[in-house]
Image (cartoon, rainbow, N blue to C red):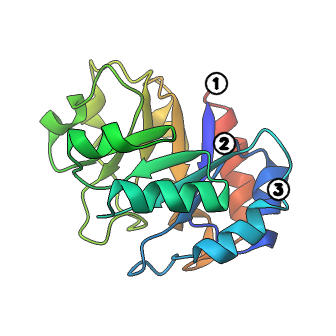
Amino acid sequence: MRIKICGITNLEDALLSIKAGADALGFVFYKPSPRYITPEKATQIIKQLPPFIERVGLFVNEDAKTINNICKSTNISLAQIHFDASDALYNELEIPHIKVIRAKNEDDINKYSDEYRLVDVYHEAYGGSGKRLNLNYFKNVDCSKIILAGGLNSNNLHTLKDFGFYGVDVSSGTEISDGKKSPKRVNDFIIEAKKLG
């Protein structure tokens, strides 16, 4: 089970997440988000991270040139494309990337089924809503390439046990307030996630 802690806005939260066992950290480069971080601040945090940690940049409604430039300047290792982008944009990306499905209904779950992808509940604010998807959507679906996001916390992770998700992604479920993590919630989340396999 791969674990991403998203909405990192400061070094303290980044390091406590890694110490607790996170595989990846998420940095939100979307200005309307309460978890927005500037590329300059993200760079300062990323410079101080230990090796072998995935550094994920979340992008909304940006062009490929902007995404490429921010990822290169900050040393982001994976771009998370959180909007309905064209094939042309994906073809122009110069770094690894993952598509996000903002699911409104059961049929959406099967988009990009041959790729690793992140599945989140549809929300106008693009992530961090604390809302959950209906797990019945995933019955009889191969979840081995799905990273699940949306409304997850240490108290409900056990409900994912039988689905075989590749990973989980959490933001608001580990926070004290927007953009500020609770060490206890981060630790508890990662402990419960690792029980899933």
SS assignment at label 2? helix
Task: Pick the residue in front: 121 or 115.
Answer: 115
Query: Which residue position is annotated with label 1?
Result: 197
Q: Quadrant of the C terminus?
A: top right
- Residue drawn at x 45%, y 40% as measured from the top left: 97
What label does residue 192 carry, if any?
2
Taking the image as shown, residue 58 lies to the left or right of residue 42, namely left
Up the image or down, 104 lies above or below 139; here it is below
Residue 133 coordinates in the image, percent (x, y): 30, 48
Ranked by sequence position, the earlier of labels 3 and 1 is 3
Residue 78 coordinates in the image, percent (x, y): 55, 44
Residue type indicated by callout 2: Glu
Disc 1 and disc 2: Cα gap in Å? Answer: 10 Å
Residue type indicated by callout 1: Gly
Q: Are marks 1 and 2 in contact (CB under 8 Å)?
A: no
Residue 179 coordinates in the image, percent (x, y): 59, 77
Q: Is residue 153 visible?
A: no
How many other residues sit within 10 Å of disc 1, few (<14), some (14-19) or many (≥20)?
few
Q: Are marks 2 and 3 in contact (CB under 8 Å)?
A: no
- Residue drawn at x 29%, y 30% as measured from the top left: 138
How many other residues sit within 10 Å of disc 2, few (<14), some (14-19) or many (≥20)?
some
Taking the image as shown, residue 18 lies to the left or right of residue 139, namely right
Taking the image as shown, residue 131 lies to the left or right of residue 111, namely right
Disc 3 and disc 1: Cα gap in Å? Answer: 26 Å
- Residue drawn at x 23%, y 69% as measured from the top left: 124
Query: Which residue position is annotated with label 3?
Result: 49
Ranked by sequence position, the earlier of labels 1 and 2 is 2
Disc 2 and disc 3: Cα gap in Å? Answer: 24 Å
SS assignment at label 1? loop
Task: Pick the residue in front: 163 or 8.
Answer: 8
